[in-house]
Amino acid sequence: DIQMTQSPSSLSASVGDRVTITCRASQSIDSYLNWYQQKPGKAPKLLIYAASTLHIGVPSRFSGSGSGTDFTLTISSLQPEDFATYFCQQSYNNFSFGGGTKVEI
Amino acid sequence: QVQLQESGPGLVKPSQTLSLTCTVSGGSISSGRYYWSWIRQPAGKGLEWIGRIYTSGSTNYNPSLRSRVTISLDTSKNHFSLKLSSVTAADTAVYYCARSPGPGMVRFFDFWGQGTLVAVSS
């Protein structure tokens, strides 16, 4: 099984801040890494796939980078609607998710 | 626009079988090249992929759940189903169905159902 570890598990930020979330895989997963945003009581929404490709309709303030075992999700200027929990997910071998990072005020 | 909707009992007794259905609208479940997955999330916790079925009917399961899981496809009703046997309290979670394009290594979940809470309790 491939274990996905996110850090931090939570962070406090303000509108306009630049936010970076890290995801580490227990073995190399090339670039088979996706990012999701989840708000309370809702299903996750796809933000980025293949480590750095923005999904249709996702604002350009979101970006992803990395390959191998280390990946980052960056929000360049945090907006009020971005307060949510973010998950990474690998698709190199079956699927597994990180534990999530809650972005709060 | 594809839409997915989970349905099934919200309460299951321990040792029994959890059964859920995901109805797909806005497109045929048998057209195109897609995988149809089940994913769950215990309250306040992370996401766990349960398994998936391809348009052709072939399946893949999470090794940790494989012995208890069956996923099937009903193209006449445009839905797919999950059966999880011998449930315990640890299976209490919100269960989501989701679609992923395939085949290929770049696999992501682009459409999700709203989720349904299943509690395991006597």
Image (cartoon, rainbow, N blue to C red):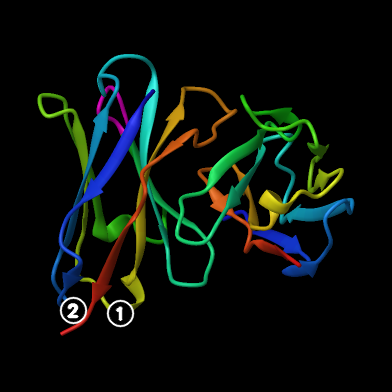
- Give above or below for A72 relative to A31: below
Find numbered disc 2 in the image and state the secondary structure of the residue it sits on. loop
Q: Are marks 2 and 1 in contact (CB under 8 Å)?
A: yes
Residue sitting nearer the eye, A86 or B75: A86
Q: How many marks?
A: 2
Task: Residue lying at the far left in this picture: please name it.
Answer: B76
How would you rate the neighbour count of disc 1 (Cα within 10 Å): few for under 14, some for 14-19, many for 20 or more? some
Q: Which residues are magenta?
A: B54-58
The residue beneath circle 2 is B14
Query: Is B31 on the left or on the right of B81, as rendered?
Result: right
Residue sitting nearer the eye, A62 or A16: A16
Q: Looking at the image, is mark 2 or mark 1 earlier in the sequence?
A: 2
Query: Is B20 on the left or on the right of A91, as rendered?
Result: left
Give coordinates of residue A75: x percent, y percent. Answer: 81, 45
Q: Classify residue A28 by image quadrant.
A: top right
Let me know if residue A92 appears in the view: no
Give coordinates of residue A5: x percent, y percent. Answer: 71, 61
Task: Residue lying at the far top in this picture: please name it.
Answer: B32
- Give above or below for B30 relative to B64: above
**Tag of residue A36:** none
Identified at 62% across, 64% down, the residue is A99
Residue type at tag 1: Ala
The residue beneath circle 1 is B89
Most frequent secondary structure within the magenta stretch: loop
Give coordinates of residue A13: x percent, y percent. Answer: 83, 63
In which quadrant will I find the C terminus of chain A? bottom right
Identified at 79% across, 41% down, the residue is A68
Judging from the image, mark 2 belongs to the subunit labelled B
- Give above or below for A56 relative to A96: above
